[in-house]
Each structure stands twice: as structure tokens, then as C-alpha cells.
Amino acid sequence: MTSNSENAAAGSATKMRRIRSFVLRTGRMTEGQRRAYDIHWPSKGLSLADGEVDFEQVFGRRAPVALEIGFGMGDSLATMARNDPDTDFVGVEVHSPGVGRLMYLIDEQGIENLRAYCDDAVEVLERCVPDQSLSRVQIYFPDPWHKKRHHKRRLVQPEFVALLAKKLRAGGVLHLATDWENYAEHMMAVMTASPDFSNTCSDGGFAPRPEYRPITKFEKRGERLGHGVWDLLFAKNAE
């Protein structure tokens, strides 16, 4: 017999999975990406099937852990990991060519403080990431779902933010960035309403880009076209 609490938990998980952390895209790995994946995934990849992870065991040390959701082709994440050897980084990306590319960068640049999942971030958070284990969560340029009728598909929603709060340590930072002004306003409204977070900017507004977040080629192209970029930095409140 299933208990009421188990039923409630199952219902909550079902509701949460209505929001996906990705749009499934087609595409094949290049030969180089596939080779890098095959060689380095056993040591640098993490699996949803393995369940809850012990980051100290994975990285062989105790260090702050930053998790990036949707790292694309991995260039920015690899740069951050290389530039901050005192922090351990975990990337989550469902697009396999991007994961293959990240494995290539890890090998090419000799990066030891970076691991990756090739899975949906909601499931990774629910099944693999221990509560209060992360020092930072970063979500850069998620799909804006710019049509109004699609806004409900946006990743940054109150229930997802509440899940992230469970995984962050007190004082840990949720860092969001987007180049869609409407989505930036949506993110700001969701984060401001969250009881779990406080804006790190004293004026309650958007933040300057932190030095640790590299400017991507995509972002530079947007700047040339006159597009703005908005960063949000919110810290988890102490319980």
C-alpha cells in the first residue's frame, strides 16, 4: 500500500516535470566529439541512474560546487572551471553534441574540476543533487519562449526556483542571465516574490555581469546588434 506522503511526493514530481530544462534538439556528435565522449565520459561523466551523488567523493576533495544548467557547447563552462580551480563545477546538458564538445575541452585544456550530466536538469536535481550541497547555480540564456502563449514553458518558474533553493546552501547564489528583456522582467518578478532568496543588489535591480561569467560569442553578436543582456544574482536566505 502506498502512503499519502508517497502519493504527494509522486504528484509533486509529476507536476515539476511539466517544466523541462531543455528543448530537445536533433543533431549528431562530430567524430571528435564522439571520440572525446567515449574516452572521457567514464571519468568525467555523471549518470542519473547512479542516484544521489557525493561531490566530495566525485572530486576527491571538499570545495564549493557550482552547477550550470544548460551549458550548450560548453565553452563558457570550461573557461569558468579553468579560471577557478578552487571551485568544482558540474554541468547539465541534454544535447549530446554539447556534452561531447565539453569532454573534448576538458581533455584539451586539462580541466580536472569539471563533471557533466547528459540528462534533464529537473530530474538531476530531484534524484542526484543532495540538499544544501551547492554554492552556486547558474542558468545562462535559457530558452525565452518569447511568445506569450508559451511563457508557461519557461524554466524559471516559482516551483523550479523552490527546488533550486533546496539544493543551495544558505548564502549560495542563483545566477540567471538572459538577452530577452521580457524574460528578464519575468525572472525578476519570480525571484523577487520567492521567500527563499534575496537580491544581492542593494537597489533591488539587475546586476552587473560578474567577472567570472565569460562573454560568449553569442552574447558579443547580440551586443553588436544592440541587444541588451540582464544578469540577476540572488542569494539564498538563511533558514
Image (cartoon, rainbow, N blue to C red):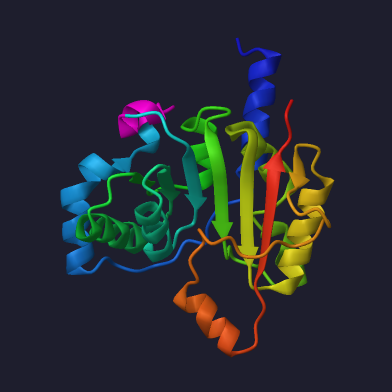
Residue at 53% x, 62% y is 211
**Quadrant assignment for the C terminus:** top right
Relative height, residue 205 to residue 4 (above, below) = below
Provide the residue span drawn in magenta: 50-60
Residue at 64% x, 32% y is 166
Relative height, residue 8 to residue 71 (above, below) = above
Number of marks in picture: 0
Q: Is residue 153 visible?
A: yes
Q: Nearer the viewer, residue 106 or 36?
A: 106
Residue found farthest to the bottom? 225
Judge whether residue 59 is colored magenta.
yes
From the viewer's perspective, tell me whether residue 147 is left or right of residue 122: right
Residue at 82% x, 55% y is 204
Relative height, residue 193 to residue 10 (above, below) = below
From the viewer's perspective, tell me whether residue 209 is left or right of residue 97: right
Image coords of residue 60 (percent x, y): 30, 29
Image coords of residue 143 (percent x, y): 59, 66
Q: Nearer the viewer, residue 70 or 217?
A: 217
Q: Nearer the viewer, residue 57 or 70?
A: 57
Q: Quadrant of residue 142?
A: bottom right
